């Protein structure tokens, strides 16, 4: 029960220019204001600090700077984070600066990231709720700003 079940899945991203969008859809468009990537050791045992997602922390710092975010926990409204294992969600919340190091587990237990909280996380159910697609690289994080 601690690992996401294997399942089928798909994802799509549709990009268009203003000329390809109607007047109605132009006012509803979504803008990508930041994007970043960083690498880390895949195997926990190879990491200097096995409990930390250092690559995710580096990518978040770059994306936050691009987007002008200085207080992620306050400025981000909802997040979908990698949670193929229970510990992964805890590590993601800390790497993304939504919780202080060592505090995410207790804060999850307190309901701080639930559907009715200030910062809901994994409203979709995450990988633990929906399953992980074998052979597909699952996105590490998706955040939404108002």
Image (spheres, grey):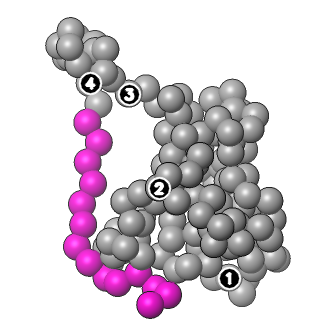
At a point 50% along the width and 87% down the height, the residue shown is 2
Asked if residue 55 can be seen in this view, the reply is no
Circle 1 packing at 10 Å, graded few (<14), some (14-19), many (20+), is few
The part of the image, by quadrant, that contains residue 45 is bottom right
Circle 2 packing at 10 Å, graded few (<14), some (14-19), many (20+), is few
Label 4 sits on residue? 16
Quadrant where the image shows the N terminus:
bottom left
At a point 68% along the width and 82% down the height, the residue shown is 44
Circle 3 packing at 10 Å, graded few (<14), some (14-19), many (20+), is few
Mark count: 4
At a point 74% along the width and 77% down the height, the residue shown is 51
Instruction: Give the numbered dot on residue 115.
Output: 2
Label 2 – label 4 distance at C-alpha: 31 Å
Upstream in the sequence, badge 2 or badge 1? 1
Marks 3 & 1, CB-CB < 8 Å contact? no
Q: Position of residue 74 (x, y in %)?
A: 68, 39
Label 3 sits on residue? 30
Secondary structure state at the residue bearing disc 4: loop
Upstream in the sequence, badge 4 or badge 3? 4
The label nearer to you, 2 versus 4, is 2
Q: Position of residue 40 (x, y in %)?
A: 67, 66
Q: Where is residue 146 in the image (x, y as percent from the top left)?
A: 50, 29
Residue range (magenta): 1-14
Does residue 107 sit above or below 18 in this rendering? below
Instruction: Give the numbered dot on residue 44.
Output: 1
Q: Is the magenta stretch mostly helix, strand or loop?
A: loop
């Amino acid at each position: 029960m601690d690992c996401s079940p294997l399942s089928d899945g798909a994802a799509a991203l549709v990009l268009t220019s203003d000329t390809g969008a109607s007047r109605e859809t132009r006012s509803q468009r979504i803008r990508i204001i930041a994007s970043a990537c960083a690498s880390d050791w895949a195997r926990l045992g190879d990491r200097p600090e096995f409990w930390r997602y250092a690559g995710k922390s580096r990518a978040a710092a770059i994306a936050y700077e691009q987007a002008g975010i200085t207080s992620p926990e306050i400025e981000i409204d909802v997040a979908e984070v990698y949670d193929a294992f229970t510990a992964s969600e805890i590590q993601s919340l800390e790497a993304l600066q939504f919780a202080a190091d060592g505090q995410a587990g207790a804060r999850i237990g307190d309901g701080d990231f639930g559907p009715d909280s200030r910062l809901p996380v994994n409203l979709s159910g995450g990988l633990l709720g929906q399953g992980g697609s074998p052979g597909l690289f699952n996105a590490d994080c998706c955040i939404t700003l108002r």
